[in-house]
Amino acid sequence: MESFVLRLRAVIECGNAAHALKDVEGFLMDPEGYALMLLAAEGYGVGEILEVGSYMGRSTCWLALGAKHAHREKVTAVDHFKGSPEHQSGRECESLALVEEGTTFNRFMENLRTAGVQDYVEPIIASSEEAVRNWNKPIRLLFIEGDHSYAASRRDYELWSPFVVPGGYICFHDIGNAPGVTLFHQELLKQSSQYSHIVSVVSLSVLQKNA
Ligand SMILES: C[S@@+](CC[C@H](N)C(=O)[O-])C[C@H]1O[C@@H](n2cnc3c(N)ncnc32)[C@H](O)[C@@H]1O
């Protein structure tokens, strides 16, 4: 009975957050966002929550809603806000914001304010490679969603994974949709004993760092 009620509450919580974020443009489906929200609120470990690749803040808002609700660590959002190759003019996911403003940062900030989480997000306007040079804090939840190519996914993993605490998580998005990150994710699970796959939610894969 108790767990039935808890599960019903989770449905309501997911529905409420999905409704609040329905106008935030981005690439995350509601169940994927809710998984990030739960990890931010209830995930194991002590350390920062950091995402690489924020775009207009959809994943950032899900993460920050969870963290804020639970009074846990704030979210650091790393992005140069100039879009990935597929967001550029004439490409398959052309971004109107990029065409009009040359950056997605203004829409990102606007979306954080609308969702009421601007006080829970520290943006770093820089590439992943630049941002990591000044980084020295432990991370308990790392969400990698920058450039989806094999080389960039591998680079982001290699740059940021050393900061993930034992028992902490790395999440990858678009597994099964984007060939580059899918191949890297497959190789990582085969070749490294550092992480174990704990769950997939649609195309979001959640790995936990072994103790
Ligand atoms: C698919 S979008 C992220 C979507 C976002 N997580 C969401 O939920 O809607 C990828 C983002 O990665 C950023 N990006 C691409 N290469 C990057 C790099 N080397 N460093 C930092 N950000 C990068 C792009 O600017 C873009 O905003």
Image (cartoon, helix red, strand yellow):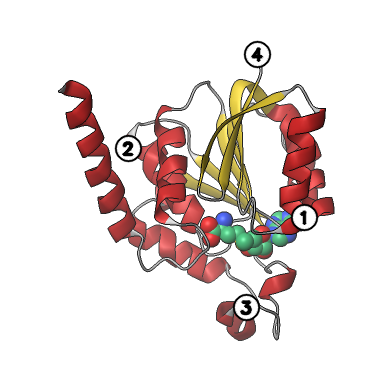
Q: Nearer the viewer, residue 177 or 50?
A: 177
Ligand 1's quadrant: bottom right
Distance between the alpha carbons at the discs numbered 2 and 4 = 27 Å
Residue 128 in the figure: left or right of residue 42: right
Considering only order in the chain, which callout, 3 or 4, is on the residue closer to the N terminus? 3
Residue 74 in the image: state x and y as whole percent. Answer: 48, 38
* Residue located beneath label 2 in the image: 69
In space, the residues marked 4 and 1 are separated at their CA atoms by 28 Å
Residue type pointed to by label 3: Leu
The quadrant of the rendering that contains the N terminus is: top left
135 lies left or right of 141: right
Front-lying residue, 140 or 182: 182
- Kindly identify the residue that appears in the image at 63 percent across and 79 percent down: 94
x and y, in percent, of residue 185 in the image: 72, 42
Mark 2 to mark 3: distance in Å? 32 Å
Instruction: Give the number of the mark in front: 1 or 3.
Output: 1
Extreme residue toward the top, this view? 211
- Nearest to viewer (mark 2 / mark 1): 1
Residue hosting label 3? 98
**What distance separates the C-alpha of mark 1 from that of mark 3?**
23 Å
Dot 4: element: loop
Percent of width and height locating residue 73: 47, 32
Instruction: Report crowding for label 3: few under 14, some 14 to 19, many 20 or more residues within 10 A (C-alpha).
Output: some
* CB-based contact (under 8 Å), mark 2 and mark 1: no
Residue bearing mark 1: 180
Label 2: few (<14), some or many (≥20) within 10 Å? few
Occupied quadrant, residue 91 = bottom right
The residue type indicated by label 2 comes to His
- The CA distance from mark 4 to mark 3 is 42 Å
